[in-house]
Amino acid sequence: MARPRNQEARKRELIAVTSRLLVERGQGGARLVDIAEAASLTPAAVSYYYPDLADLYADTYETAIAEYSTRRRRHVADIASPVERLTECIALGVPHAGTSSHAATVLLMELSALAIRQERIVASGAEFEAEQLDLFSEILESGARSGAMHLQYDVLETARAILAVEDGIAIPVVAGRLPAEDALRVSLSVASSLTGANLLAGRP
């Protein structure tokens, strides 16, 4: 790893290394010694920047959720139709192998497992959930106002239901028990029943 110009640059590089190891190897392959080796540093050097490895994991989690949320919002921002925007938003949440969505999902799953022990990750996880609920709610409200959607429940309840399906279905997809396309079809079917809109139109 090339020597950065400042401490923040070094931390960003360590976060990038940690992210890659968590995706490729899981927590068991992202220990202090693993991170140090992958970063071409000594464990003591890593500890200089992160005396507590939990803080490195927390910074990695915060970076991952910020990038995920930003990427998702930007991707759907210019889609005019609320139905098409919701469809695309849901599609982005399905971890297709080989995509940035899959890597991000694996990373978030690995780090979320630490949430019961790391207060910063608990707090960041709550903020991440709120951001996803806000995005879904904005789309649902737009769809209801335009008459393109006829919600069976209130906006927040509907958003929570859609997000719950997304979170729950990601595990069998990443584990290889459920094909991503099947997961997408199920997710869109559930959202269609909740919104009264045909989100499956035009899909195989």
Image (cartoon, grey):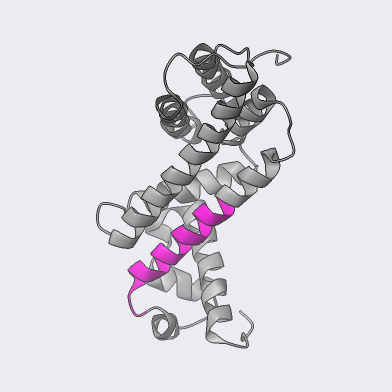
Answer left or right for 100 relative to 161. Answer: right
Residue 177 screen position, x and y as percent:
47, 26
Residue 192 screen position, x and y as percent:
55, 14
Please, is residue 61 above or below residue 100 in the view? below
Please, is residue 110 above or below residue 43 in the view? above
Please, is residue 44 above or below residue 18 in the view? below
Asked if the magenta segment contains residue 46, the reply would be no
Residue 26 screen position, x and y as percent:
43, 53
- The residue drawn where x is 74% and y is 39% is 78
- The residue drawn where x is 49% and y is 74% is 37
Looking at this view, is 151 or 67 the one in front? 151
Magenta range is 51-68
Looking at this view, is 192 or 94 the one in front? 192
Q: Quadrant of the N terminus?
A: bottom right
Q: Quadrant of the C terminus?
A: top right
Answer left or right for 191 relative to 146. Answer: left
Looking at this view, is 61 or 173 the one in front? 61
Q: In the rendered image, which quarter is residue 42 located in?
A: bottom left
Q: How many marks?
A: 0
What kind of secondary structure does the magenta stretch mostly adopt? helix
Answer left or right for 121 relative to 8. Answer: left
Looking at this view, is 84 or 51 the one in front? 84
- The residue drawn where x is 25% and y is 57% is 117
Asked if the magenta segment contains residue 54, the reply would be yes
Outermost residue toward the front in this view: 145
Outermost residue toward the left in this view: 117
Answer left or right for 167 relative to 136. Answer: left
Residue 61 screen position, x and y as percent:
45, 58
